[in-house]
Structure formats: structure tokens, C-alpha cells
Amino acid sequence: MTTTTTMQTRTSATRAARSELRTIEGIYRAPGLHWVGDGFRVAGFFSAIPEAAQKLNPFLLLDYHPTYEYAPTASPRGVGVHPHRGFETVTLAWQGSVAHHDSAGGGGVIGPGDVQWMTAASGVLHKEYHEESYARRGGPFQMAQLWVNLPKAHKMSPPRYQSITSDRMGIVTLPENAGSVRVVAGEYQGVKGPAQTFTKIELFDVRLNARGRVELAFPARHNLGLLVMKGDIAVNGAHAAAHDLAVFENAGERLLIEAGSEAHLLVLSGEPIDEPIVQYGPFVMNSAQEIQQAFADFASGKFGHLDD
């Protein structure tokens, strides 16, 4: 076979893969809700998916807080001071308001449409709770939190905090009144999201009107999940309803999504980090020895100080 023929064959194979619909590994119903602290009533989807950390690498956790009405309170609900090392936490807000502080000096408030992207890396102390004015008036609350792994080369980098407000999001309005795609990270139709990431990640907040449709494409090697937060959809021919998480195999590239009713979706795709994952609670490293060192550093005060 000549070099030219070989190149043509590879090009044809690449085009064929790009034209194929992504194969669905499974569609998982939301597990039972549980409380994180006294302020976050979430469904921990990774607990419902066998080998989730491998299938959705570099994502380590997806906690979804469906809409819930909190009563007014003078004492804001939330989670007290706790440590993190070796990964990032990403919090997306749709209803309600959350305040955040960490021992590296990061912090702020996110409300509807905002995203909080905290890179714990070498280690921080962290707390998050309902923002004071929201806590006083109460009301609906809807958010999601992702944990994103860091490659070994960046696990001990300095902590970083990105406050990504709604007005900074990349937005693509879909044709024929189908809906819209908000780009938090990555790129869609030439529109880039504002989040800075250590590995290639796409994070899209998609809203579809009834009978609206959208087509997305991701490299077959990248791991891919789709959370349905509202409505019912057909994705690559399979049905998924509110509070379902579709997980895809590494075959094909295209997603064809059609909404049977008004729908709200979170799409997460990432290039897998081909390194060992050793996790113990809030520490995610590459070896048991590094986990032991994280505990030692935390105990000796190397994560800094943060008032509860």
C-alpha cells in the first residue's frame, strides 16, 4: 500500500467516525437524595454508575441539587470548613445563591447563571453556604457541582479561583427557535467559554424548546455524559427524562438531541487523564503515599487557616 493510499484510508476512517452517532453506554436514573451539610440536598450520580470514575474521567463526581424550596432562616445553611487537594470543584447555579470562601483568599457569591470554579490543587480549606440575603428570604434553589481531576503535573500547583458570572458566558442561539447553548468551558460553533482548564473540557448548559433539536460533536476518545434536568429528550434515538444521566461509550462523535418537551440539559465532556486515581475523601492523588502526605500536611496546617 502506498503512502498516499494509507493517508486516504486514515482520512476516510476519521470522517466515518465523525459522522457516526455516539454509542450510549447506559442511561442512569438519579439515586436517592442525600444532604451535604445542612444546605445541599443532592443526588450523587457517580454512586449509581459502575466504574463511574473511569467512564467519565476526568470527572470525579456529579452532585445535582434539583429545585427545592428552602424556608427563610437567620442562620445560613451550608457546609463548614473542609480541605481539598488534587482536583477542582465546579459549582453551577440556576436558582438561589451561594457564598464561598477558601484559605487561599478566593471567594465570592454566585447566583442564577453563574459558575464558581475552584482549583484546590496543592491544598485549600474551603466552606460554602447559602448567601446571607438569600437565606433570609428563602426560596427555590437549584445547582450542580462537579469534581474535576487534575493531572499529576498540576496537582501541587498553587490554588486558583475563577468567578464566572453569567454575562461572561459564551451563548449560541440555535436556529428555528430550537433553544440555546451556553458555553462554560470549551467551544461550540466558534463560541468559546470563559473557564480556564488544565485539560480539554467541554461544559455546555443547553436549553431546548419543545420539538427543538441540537447537534453536538465531541472527540470519540473524550468521555461524555449528559444530565437531563428538565423535560424529556431523544438522544441518539434513546429516550431520557428529567433526572436521567446518559453516559456514552468511546465510539462515534455526534450527539443528536431532540426535545419532546421544554428541556434543560448539562453536557460534560473531557479528555481522560491516563494516570492512577487514588481518592480518600477530599483528597485525590496518584498514590497512597501522596494521600498520606496530604493528611500530614493538613494536620500540620499547610492548607492555611479559615474561620468557620
Image (cartoon, rainbow, N blue to C red):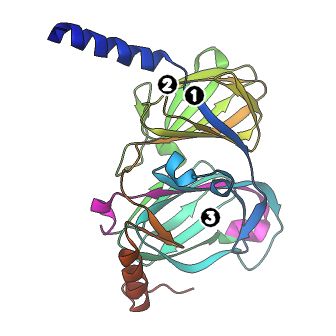
From the image, state whether disc 3 or disc 2 is nearer to you: 2
- Cα distance, mark 3 to mark 1? 37 Å
Q: Choose top left, top right, bottom left or bottom right for residue 193.
A: top left
Disc 1 vs disc 2: Cβ atoms closer than 8 Å?
Answer: yes
Q: Choose top left, top right, bottom left or bottom right for residue 281.
A: bottom right
Percent of width and height locating residue 182:
54, 36
Which residue range is magenta in the image?
A: 133-158
Q: Is residue 158 above or below residue 229?
A: below
Residue designated by label 2: 252
Residue designated by label 1: 23
Disc 3 vs disc 2: Cβ atoms closer than 8 Å?
Answer: no
Please tell me whether residue 142 belongs to the stretch shown in magenta. Answer: yes
Judge left or right: residue 93 versus residue 185. right
Task: Residue type at mark 1: give it.
Answer: Thr
In the foreground, 213 or 29: 29
Q: Secondary structure at mark 2?
A: loop
Please tell me whether residue 134 belongs to the stretch shown in magenta. Answer: yes
From the image, state whether disc 3 or disc 1 is nearer to you: 1
Percent of width and height locating residue 14:
36, 18
Percent of width and height locating residue 243:
75, 44
Task: Residue type at mark 2: give it.
Answer: Gly
- Cα distance, mark 1 to mark 2? 6 Å
Going from N to C along the chain, the mark reached first, 1 or 2, is: 1
In the foreground, 78 or 268: 268
- Count neighbours of disc 1 (C-alpha within 10 A) and say few if under 14, some if 14 to 19, many if 20 or more: some
Q: Is residue 292 above or below residue 99?
A: below
- Count neighbours of disc 3 (C-alpha within 10 A) and say few if under 14, some if 14 to 19, many if 20 or more: many
Residue designated by label 3: 98
Task: Residue type at mark 3: give it.
Answer: Val
Q: Secondary structure at mark 3?
A: strand
Q: Is residue 234 visible?
A: yes
Q: Is residue 303 visible?
A: no
